[in-house]
Amino acid sequence: MEKVGSIIFLNFLFIICLAAPLMVQSTIENPRENIDQWFQNLPHAKQKLTRLHFYFHDVVLGPHPTVVAVANASHTFTSPTFFGRVNIFDNPLTQGPEPGSKLVGRAQGLYGFTSQEEVSLLMAMNFVFRSWKHNGSSLTVLGRNPVGQLVRELPIVGGTGVFRLARGFVLAKTYFFNASVATVEYNVAALHY
Ligand SMILES: *[C@@H]1O[C@H](CO)[C@@H](O)[C@H](O)[C@H]1NC(C)=O
Ligand SMILES: *[C@@H]1O[C@H](CO)[C@@H](O)[C@H](O)[C@H]1NC(C)=O
Ligand SMILES: *[C@@H]1O[C@H](CO)[C@@H](O)[C@H](O)[C@H]1NC(C)=O
């Protein structure tokens, strides 16, 4: 019992002493009040539709890759669809298709190759915005991405900040790809309050 207590205490110390300074400052000072107020206003809030458009840069090779492979299955290497591989990414989102175009946020998440019949991904990612009035807010996308199809639809399952309780969908369309980079155009439709 004592040991468990001290481990918890050590973890707590770690969070306070080491992790806290690394945490990004949140603008919420009183979480309880924030939630109370948010739900008080909710009955008067109108549902809004926000549409966003940006480009996602998946840099697999080169001097600054934004994707790392974290796991392969033993048969990934013989599978034509890379079945079993899992990649983690932290990809820039830009206003235009060029990599040097204005940065509007990042897509952070992972994708696994989940089909034995075609190259198809299970994607779990957060769009973290750094621009517009959505700075600091995020949208969470979870869905199936059969990358060979012209346009793929993935659900938005939630969000934070201005996107609290969001739902919606994204349409992903490959704009450019070669062996080292894939640029994907995203059209986003999110309903939120
Ligand atoms: C998985 O395979 C890829 C491609 O061969 C390789 O780059 C990567 O390092 C491997 N990752 C792991 C965790 O085995
Ligand atoms: C977004 O928010 C961050 C942190 O609060 C701030 O440093 C940055 O200047 C903001 N960017 C824009 C474009 O408003
Ligand atoms: C892929 O395209 C990018 C952008 O045009 C280029 O910088 C890169 O060298 C290309 N990579 C390969 C392997 O052709």
Image (spheres, rainbow, N blue to C red):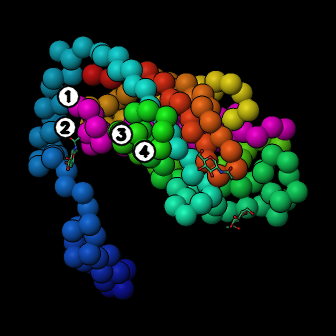
Crowd tier of the residue under label 4, counting other residues whose Cα lies within 10 Å: few below 14, some 14–19, many 20 or above? few
Mark 3 or mark 2: whose residue is earlier in sequence: 2
Q: At 63% from the left edge and 63% from the top edge, which residue is drawn?
A: 70
| Mark 4 lies within 8 Å of ligand 3 (Cβ measured) | no
Q: Work out whether 130 lies above or below 89.
A: above
Q: Which residue in the structure is indicated by mark 4?
A: 100
The CA span between labels 1 and 3 is 35 Å
- What secondary structure is found at the residue carrying circle 3? loop
Mark 4 or mark 2: whose residue is earlier in sequence: 2
Which quarter holds ligand 2? top left
Q: Which residue in the structure is indicated by mark 3?
A: 102
- What secondary structure is found at the residue carrying circle 2? helix
Residue 70 magenta: no
Q: Which residue in the structure is indicated by mark 1?
A: 39
Marks 1 and 2: in contact by CB < 8 Å?
A: yes
Residue 16's label in the rendered image is none
> Marks 4 and 2: which is nearer the front?
4
Marks 2 and 4: in contact by CB < 8 Å?
A: no
Disc 3 marks a residue whose amino acid type is Lys
Residue 35's label in the rendered image is 2
The CA span between labels 2 and 1 is 6 Å
Q: At 68% from the left edge and 24% from the top edge, which residue is drawn?
A: 150
Crowd tier of the residue under label 1, counting other residues whose Cα lies within 10 Å: few below 14, some 14–19, many 20 or above? few
Q: Work out whether 61 lies above or below 34.
A: below
- What secondary structure is found at the residue carrying circle 4? loop
Mark 1 or mark 4: whose residue is earlier in sequence: 1
- Which region of the structure is painted magenta? 117-146
Position of the C terminus, as image quadrant, is top left
Crowd tier of the residue under label 3, counting other residues whose Cα lies within 10 Å: few below 14, some 14–19, many 20 or above? some
Q: Nearer the viewer, residue 37 or 82?
A: 82
